[in-house]
Amino acid sequence: MEIKAYNRARDEEKLMELIKNEGEAWSCYWADDVADKYKAALAKSITYVAYEGDVLCGYSRSIDDCGFYIYVCDLLVMREHRGKNIGRRLMECLDEDYPDQIVFVMSDVDVYYEKQGYRREGSIFEVTKKCS
């Protein structure tokens, strides 16, 4: 297994296929009306991809808050490749490449991160506009 920095020309098609194969829950990234926007976000983010042979089997996407913090937005490993520490290795890339920055995870799968030994630190709230 090899982890690489995302390269749009090499990885975009395979990565979008990985996301699409996760089903409707991830359609906020692959649906026709948002796919181009997400592809642009991948290129502007800190994105790593994991390969087993020529199969892109996982990825992480994070954003850098001007050098203050890094926020992990997405972490996904193909179902058939889970349990091989691929997610953990993707997360370790951030610590290796950004050793002086604190990394936070924005997650709706808290059990995974707790199992990895990460400490819960606060909450995330969605701010929505109220209708009058």
Image (tube, rainbow, N blue to C red):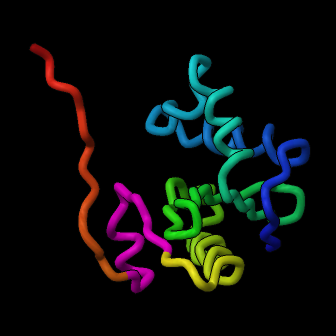
Q: Residue at (33%, 82%) from the top-left corner? A: 119
- Outermost residue to the left: 132
Against 70, is 117 above or below? below
Judge whether residue 85 can be spotted in this image: no
User: Which quarter shows the N terminus?
Assistant: bottom right
Residue bounds of the magenta highlight: 103-118
- The quarter holding residue 122 reads bottom left
- The quarter holding residue 50 reads bottom right
95 left or right of 51 in image: left
Q: Residue at (33%, 70%) from the top-left corner? A: 111
Judge whether residue 54 can be spotted in this image: yes
**Is 113 a magenta residue?**
yes
Which percent across, then down, holds residue 10?
A: 90, 47
Q: Residue at (79%, 62%) from the top-left corner? A: 5
- Outermost residue to the top: 132
Against 66, is 88 above or below? below
User: Which quarter shows the C terminus?
Assistant: top left
Q: Residue at (29%, 74%) from the top-left corner? A: 121
Which percent across, then down, holds residue 109?
A: 37, 60
Which percent across, then down, holds residue 22?
A: 55, 42
Is 11 or 55 nearer to us in this picture? 11
**Is 116 a magenta residue?**
yes
Is 104 or 75 nearer to us in this picture? 104
124 left or right of 53 in image: left
Which percent across, then down, holds residue 124?
A: 28, 56
